[in-house]
Amino acid sequence: MPSNTSTNADTLPKVLQIKEITADATINIVLDTLEQNKQAIVFCNSKRSAEKCAEDSSRKINTATSLYDSKNKTIILSESEKKQLSEISEDILHALSKPTKQCERLAECVKKGVAYHHAGLVHEQKSIIEDAFRKSLIKIICATPTLALGVSLPAFRVIIKDLRRYYHGRIEAGNENNEKGMRYIPVLEYHQMAGRAGRPEHSKIGEAITIASTEAEKQKINEIFINGEPEDIYSKLGVEPVLRSCLLSLIATNFVTTKEQILLFFNKTFWAHQFGDMYHLTKIIDKVLGMLEEFGFIELIGQDKLHSQQEPSYNSKTGYVDGILNKNTTNEGFTSAAELFSAGETNKIFFDGMSEKNNKINGSNNKTKENANNLKERVNEIKKINSEIRYNATHLGKRVSELYIDPLTAHEIILAMERAQDKRVLTIPLSFLHMISCALELRPKLNVKSKEIDDIMQKLVESEGSLIVLEPSQYEPEYDNYINSFKTALFFQDWIDEMDEEYLLEKYDIRPGEIKVKLDIADWLVYSSSELCKLLTYQNMLAEINKLRIRLKYGTKEELLALLKLENIGRMRARKLYSHGIKDIGDVKKANIVTLAQLIGKSVAINIKEQVGEKVKKEDIEVKENKRKGQISLKDF
């Protein structure tokens, strides 16, 4: 049962009469959109669902007989559109060097004017689809909700097929209670998707349609999404990985150098404004500062000055943090400078200052006046002392900040490399692949399914002696992440062992677009590891990591590294040359130009010969018809 709203505020919700050509309400609305010669975006809750919706729609379009124009002819696609879509289909099919089944399925859909769009497609394929949709060649896109974020792709009609999504038990938008299972998506996300409806340059209205199977569900949709209030927006600065990187960056660039400057900076953020509890906020900041100091990324300069300020402590606390933030606070005593600078005491001071900020000084109470004056003097004294105590980023900390990786990731990489350097493990490429796969930056990891757990655990046991990230206890919550990281490392291992995208899709259920994203992040992490290696002077390990980076880039075995130094030589050409005995630069120099031309083409053969210092003219190359590798001429029979 469709539930429809219009994007035109002056138009009341209306009832649409949709022909029930099929048993699927979504496809019926798609066909109705085509009958009006309009375009639509169908939002689905998963990549698999988007693909199925597109394929089902394309099949129904191919067999639809109820959409006619005035001459009683089908009007879904004109002959001109069919020709252009056929060309676009070929471009999509050959976006990869070797088309996968996903490419073939998508290309078939595009021929009918339908496409699916999600993170599993490579950038070139997504760009082709988006451009064709803007030109009104592709009529229907079945997409995941990511298309609603940051992509200018309006349509006359938006069909929101699924308003529920499976949550994996993580705290995220729409799942603040950390619940697991199917839940309604956030209202803000619904607004983002519905907001794609309406093309101001083509139409005065746009239609956002949701699907309800019962009257009760329709009322629920109206209550939650149509008439409901969107969720509050929360600052992400309080998320520890973000805060760690932010604090280290502020200190590494000398933007803040003292505790006073740090508190003043964060007091002006949206996080502090929204949090409303500076006591707890300061505790979090102190925890992260302590973590960065423990990692060796920052150091405290002038800390010895604290010990010269020891004084008798009193039963109550001062308003040091309030003094920094210019808050009017009274209190009944003060503590020593050393105690005052400690994280726990500083937080208590601020907290008590916040809770007592409305206290008034009674004119008749001389003791209170005296304490207030002592407080002011002491705050100024402590501020002066602490202005001389500064946070400074170490050389290692500055480089971590420049690499833009989470300081915790950098610390764990350093610990792993130290284990390898101490010869406690025999390192192999999988050692470093698992090291980077454990990083937060590579989330989401490849999830280990129940049917493959035994196989993964067997491989984990076999590789235990080579892993440089310590395995947690099976009873700890981190264990699931550990084995998911190991599966992700196995995916990278298969990639550098020259397994193609089709194999990886079948084995790991990871699509070409997702492979590209994972490889880009892996390259960043491996490069960061090599930079940390340089600072730690682990030269023997540095060579192995640099080789691994090249292998990840090209997806090749180590034996092809010499050939990959040549321009225009990738994994396929390198493998072809190697298979025919041309294994390094010396072999390229010795190789006959005709043989090279037969293997990799004339222009590339000439190019690599020039790279090794040999001049060859194209007209000098003559490839006989019956001498091409792997082929024979009809004249040979």
Image (tube, rainbow, N blue to C red):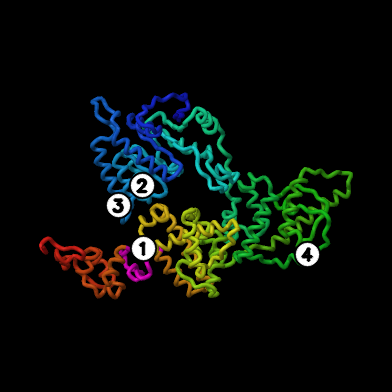
**Disc 4 versus disc 3: nearer the observer:** 3
Residue 583 vs 384, above or below: the answer is below
Q: Which amino acid does label 1 sit on?
A: Glu
How many angstroms separate mark 1 from mark 3 (CA)?
Answer: 19 Å
Magenta segment range? 552-571
Which of the labelled discs sits on residue 586, or is there none? none
Q: Which amino acid does label 2 sit on?
A: Ser
Q: Which of 75 and 539 is in front in this view?
A: 75
Q: Do the residues labelled 1 and 4 touch (CB within 8 Å)?
A: no
**Disc 1 versus disc 4: nearer the observer:** 1
Q: Mark 1 points at which residue?
A: 498
Q: What residue type is labelled 4?
A: Gln
- Residue at point 69%, 60% (across, down): 387
Which of the labelled discs sits on residue 309, or is there none? 4
Q: Nearer the viewer, residue 624 or 606?
A: 624
How many angstroms separate mark 2 from mark 4 (CA)?
Answer: 65 Å
> Going from the N terminus, do you reach mark 4 or mark 3 first?
3
